[in-house]
Amino acid sequence: DAKTTQPPSMDCAEGRAANLPCNHSTISGNEYVYWYRQIHSQGPQYIIHGLKNNETNEMASLIITEDRKSSTLILPHATLRDTAVYYCIVRVEDSNYQLIWGAGTKLIIKP
Amino acid sequence: NAGVTQTPKFQVLKTGQSMTLQCAQDMNHNSMYWYRQDPGMGLRLIYYSASEGTTDKGEVPNGYNVSRLNKREFSLRLESAAPSQTSVYFCASGTGLWGPQHFGDGTRLSIL
């Protein structure tokens, strides 16, 4: 079973920051948080990952709470092309570190 | 730069038929993976290969076999297809095991 909880859907206005929450209350100390997205029916696309520090790259920022029980993916200036399903995944130690995928959040960017 | 290439893109099989899904990557990645995705769900790992010459079972390996032919290629075989194997199959590759993965565009497989 997935170790993360995400809202099934969210809306965001074009040009605004999209903040996607993820709860992972049972995460253990050496388990990473990964974010991927899947646009329409294409293959998933890697976005970002982190352990306990906040991370930023050209696509997004990842904010992980100090207790590591939740995180937020931030798309700073959402465009219509960011409409996708976003998956928050914990790399699970007791599954040999495999990625266990949940159903994700359907993010719709509105003009 | 093609990335991860999967063939075929679509396939319809009859129950009991066999087929092999092909995957090739041109990024010199060590690790390769096969996933399936059923409607409205996330991906489930079928098999993975940490490096050339090694393969291991994932979450849902029953009914499948794999071959890591060389560093570039990782194939998935269905020996006797069943309707429950109707799904979209994704191949992925990455530099390190369980690190960031690059995905192909998928093979849409229907078994009647």
Image (tube, helix red, strand yellow):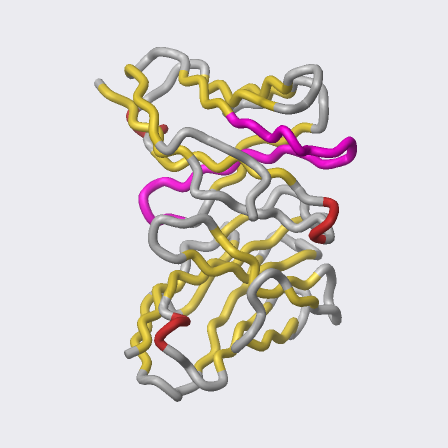
Q: Which portion, as a residue range, is magenta?
A: A22-42
Q: Is residue A10 above or below residue B89?
A: above
Q: Main secondary structure of the magenta part?
A: loop
Q: Residue at x 72, y 59 (%)?
A: B50
Q: Position of residue B13 (x, y in %)?
A: 32, 80
Q: Residue furthest top?
A: A16
Q: How many marks?
A: 0
Q: Position of residue A99 (x, y in %)?
A: 61, 47
Give whichever of A69, A31 is nearer the camera: A69
Q: Is residue A59 left or right of residue A98?
A: left
Q: Residue furthest left?
A: A111
Q: Is residue B13 visible?
A: yes
- Is residue B59 within the magenta segment? no
Q: Is residue B95 visible?
A: no
Looking at the rendered image, the quarter that the C terminus of chain B falls into is bottom left
Q: Position of residue B76 (x, y in %)?
A: 53, 73
Q: Is residue A33 above or below residue A94?
A: above
Q: Residue at x 59, y 23 (%)?
A: A70
Give whichever of B48, B70 is nearer the camera: B48
Quarter occupied by residue B99: top right
Q: Residue at x 58, y 69 (%)?
A: B61
Quarter occupied by residue A40: top left
Q: Position of residue A11 (x, y in %)?
A: 30, 22
Q: Residue at x 45, y 14 (%)?
A: A76
Give whichever of B60, A86 is nearer the camera: B60
Give whichever of B110, B25 is nearer the camera: B110
Q: Is residue A34 left or right of residue B1?
A: right
